[in-house]
Structure formats: structure tokens, C-alpha cells
Image: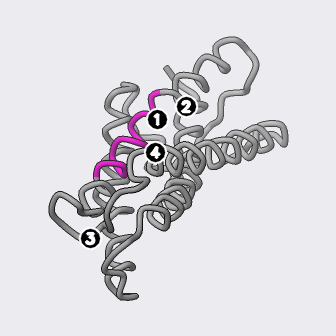
């Protein structure tokens, strides 16, 4: 993949902004909903598993709709160069085959969050023996976790939005 220094800088800035926003928004929303509440457990009405699975789908889905649309608009306006994804690299080859539909891209990134990133997170929590979260600890965890998800997925969203083609 051949990108200008300007494009690489643009991607880094957009990723950093998205990581920051997702940390703050997810921690803040979680805190507002949970403060003064009971300890969260794995399952049931007071469970964190369902919340993590839902967030792992919804957050990337929503961010995808915004990020890809914004990147496409920048390319059309001549503010950003379109990027030719090198089909020699496996990840770039995969991204080059993503559909043009914004909604379908949202489903793909949301699905990746829910079906890949959330289970990895839950497995990690299980391995280290996390059984409960206080509302405050969960809010911090969820904010940082959302930032990690954004850091992983947003660069790919940007590339899909900047890619060459119709």
C-alpha cells in the first residue's frame, strides 16, 4: 500500500481522536448508568457479558457509519488522496474486498467487534479470574476497552473509506 506522509498523519490523528472519544464516551455513559448501582457479575440482569457484547457490536457499527462516510466525503472533495490498497498484504486484500455499502461495512465491523474482539476480551477476563466489577471499576474498564477496540478497528475503517474505486 502506497500512502503519502500526509495520509499517514491523517490516519494517526483520526485514530487518536477516536480512541480518546471512545474512552471518554464509553466510560462516561457507563458511569452515568451504573453509579450507585450494584456489583456487576458475568450473567443475568446485573451481568456485564451482555453489555460488552452489545457494545462490541454497536460501537464499531456506529463509528463505521461515521468514519467511512467522512473519509469518502474528504476524498470526493479533494481534501484527501484515495488510497490503493495493496492486495499483496492479507489485511489490505481483505479490506479491498469490503462492500461499498456503508450499512454492510457497519455490519462487518460490528460483527468483528462482537464475534472476535468481545470473546477474546471475555476469555481474558475468565483466564485472569475476574468474576465481578464494581460500577466504577467497570466504567473505567469499559472506557479503556472501547478505546482499544477503536484503536484496532478505526484504522481499517479509515482505509475502507479512503480506498480507490467507486
Please provide percent x and percent y for residue 12: 74, 47
Q: Are marks 2 and 3 in contact (CB under 8 Å)?
A: no
Q: Are marks 2 and 1 in contact (CB under 8 Å)?
A: yes
| Residue at x-position 38% and y-position 35% | 105
Please provide percent x and percent y for residue 164: 58, 28
| Residue at x-position 39% and y-position 52% | 34
Tag 4 secondary structure: helix
Tag shown at residue 41: 3
- Magenta stretch bounds: 54-65
| Residue at x-position 50% and y-position 61% | 145
Give the crowd class for mark 1: few <14, some 14-19, many >=20 residues within 10 Å.
many
Magenta stretch holds residue 57? yes
* Total residue callouts: 4
User: Real-space Cα distance between discs 1 and 3?
Assistant: 30 Å
Residue that badge 4 annotates:
32
Tag shown at residue 64: 1
Residue that badge 2 annotates:
67
Magenta stretch holds residue 83? no
Amino acid at each position: 500500500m502506497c500512502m503519502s506522509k500526509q495520509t499517514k498523519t491523517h490516519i494517526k490523528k483520526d485514530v487518536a481522536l477516536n480512541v480518546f472519544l471512545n474512552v471518554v464516551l464509553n466510560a462516561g455513559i457507563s458511569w452515568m448508568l451504573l453509579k450507585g448501582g450494584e456489583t456487576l457479575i458475568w450473567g443475568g440482569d446485573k451481568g456485564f457479558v451482555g453489555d460488552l457484547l452489545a457494545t462490541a457490536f454497536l460501537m464499531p457499527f456506529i463509528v463505521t457509519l461515521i468514519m467511512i462516510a467522512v473519509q469518502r466525503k474528504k476524498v470526493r472533495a479533494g481534501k484527501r488522496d484515495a488510497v490503493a490498497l495493496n492486495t499483496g498484504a492479507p489485511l489490505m486484500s481483505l479490506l479491498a474486498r469490503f462492500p461499498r455499502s456503508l450499512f454492510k461495512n457497519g455490519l462487518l465491523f460490528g460483527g468483528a467487534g462482537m464475534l472476535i474482539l468481545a470473546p477474546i476480551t471475555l476469555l481474558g477476563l475468565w483466564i485472569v479470574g475476574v468474576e465481578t466489577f464494581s460500577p466504577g471499576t467497570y466504567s473505567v474498564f469499559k472506557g479503556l476497552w472501547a478505546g482499544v477496540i477503536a484503536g484496532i478497528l478505526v484504522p481499517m475503517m479509515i482505509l475502507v473509506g479512503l480506498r480507490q474505486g467507486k
